[in-house]
Amino acid sequence: MTRMPENTPVLIVDDDENQRRLLSGCLAQHGYATLTAADGLDALDRLARDPVAMIISDMRMPRMTGLDLLRAARERGYDFPFLLVTAFPDVRDAVGAMRDGAVNYLEKPIDLDELLTSVRTALGRRISSEIARPDVAIPPGVIADSPPMRSILRDVALVGPTDSRVLLTGESGTGKEVIADALHRISPRARQPFLKVNCAAIPENLLESELFGHEKGAFSGAVARRVGVFEEADGGTILLDEIGDMPMALQAKLLRVIQDGVFRRIGGSQTLHTDIRLIASTNRDLEQDMIAGRFREDLFFRLNVFEIHLPPLRERPEDIIPLATHFASGFLGGKVRFSPAAVALLSAYRWPGNVRELRNAMERAVLVARSEVILPEHFPPRLQTRDHTAPVQPASSGMIADVERSLILQTLKANRYNRSESARELGISRRALLYKLQRLREMGFDVDGEAR
């Protein structure tokens, strides 16, 4: 994506001249350059002649609708933000617009505060994402909105292009395998094999054969020679997942491979050489295991050249909603929206199963919802309890209302009572927020503060 100069204009497309003047004047007063077009075909002509930072388009126009303009622009390779407005709101149009890449869908008469917030958000997000994008090919599924994850990606970018051994630590389900994929993809070995072995899932008597292979007749059932992963992955990368569960006898053999790059198949006499980059992962405390005599100290220090610790999801709350959106959108095959109460429940839950549990919860939510709007009742029952360690009880409507009210009041305060910014952060329209604020005001809550 090429970054546009700051004075690159916003293209306003509407068959109503007065509407074009209104929007153009509003944006000009706030420092934005603008261009205008009377319909979709006129807009495509402008795009062929002039650079554009963003399009704001009416939905219903002669010759070409705003949705058709959005699709035509995407087909021609334009990837700038696209904002649609309409006097005739239709849920199907809104869903289609979001699925085709529109950043928002506003109703006429346009709330100019909401319009400005949408423009600032779209253009600001575009620029900041280019500045913050790490120099690493991050695979799908990596979400790095939180400071801990951004720090991890910097570590990935640092150690990924090397052959250094990496030890990935963290609770089960935090995304260690995804980070291992990222390390391999940006390494000089990226075109070579990347093999993964779960040391906890393979019985001890079979794990040695999985790693080093065996000769025909080496043991009962060995009817043919087997090539192990250290031989098969030569030149590439191996991930030893749950390394803390590897039996002590095998730890000694693994140490020799790491030190000398040599091994023998079970039942074989030939010394084989391998050139691999080793990544190990564990959810155990290996230092405590060393003290208890369950893990070799020399192996630990061989593996732990560069440690990357993935914090649990509860310690990086900024990633919860982006991850939930990513997973739910993938399962639905299009954009999804979470109600404020749903956002509150997702944010309040401690996620003992971490990212893996969140992914499963989103799969269930999409199956139950059968639409692009996700509500609290679509989540597994365990999310809807105050004490997530207590026996699961369904959440009451009163509890959900309490959580929603708390979320709205906290968001208002955090945004200094700016309603447009608060609505954007809550994922609802400004009109919906004003309605909710009126109800809270009637209940005696202070929702005005320094309202603007």
Image: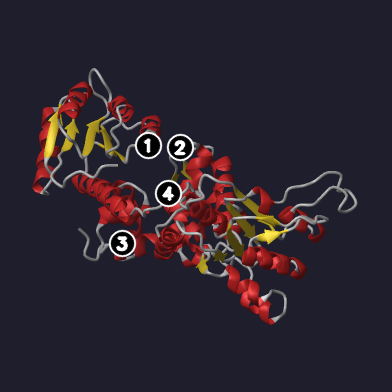
Tag 4 secondary structure: loop
Q: Residues within 10 Å of mark 3 (few under 14, many from 20)?
A: many
Q: Earlier in the sequence, mark 2 or mark 3?
A: 2
Tag 3 secondary structure: helix
Asked whether 452 or 226 is in front, the reply is: 226
Mark 4 to mark 1: distance in Å? 26 Å
Q: Is residue 203 above or below residue 303?
A: above
Q: Residue flagged by tag 3: what amino acid is it?
A: Leu
Q: Earlier in the sequence, mark 4 or mark 1?
A: 1
Mark 3 to mark 4: distance in Å? 37 Å
Q: Residues within 10 Å of mark 2 (few under 14, many from 20)?
A: some
Q: Quadrant of residue 202?
A: bottom right
Residue that sits furthest to the right in the current view: 220
Q: Residues within 10 Å of mark 4 (few under 14, many from 20)?
A: few
- Indicate the position of residue 395 as horizontal and vertical percent values: 57, 58
Mark 3 to mark 1: distance in Å? 26 Å
Mark 2 to mark 3: distance in Å? 29 Å
Residue on which the image places disc 2: 334
Residue on which the image places disc 3: 412
Residue on which the image places disc 4: 137
Asked whether 364 or 86 is in front, the reply is: 364
Q: Earlier in the sequence, mark 3 or mark 4?
A: 4
Tag 2 secondary structure: loop
Asked whether 36 or 207 is in front, the reply is: 207
Left or right: 255 as drawn, with respect to 139? right
Tag 1 secondary structure: helix
Circle number at residue 98: 1
Q: Are marks 4 and 2 in contact (CB under 8 Å)?
A: no
Asked whether 60 or 144 is in front, the reply is: 144
Q: Residue at x 73, y 55 (%)?
A: 212
Q: Residues within 10 Å of mark 1 (few under 14, many from 20)?
A: some
- Indicate the position of residue 305 as horizontal and vertical percent values: 53, 69
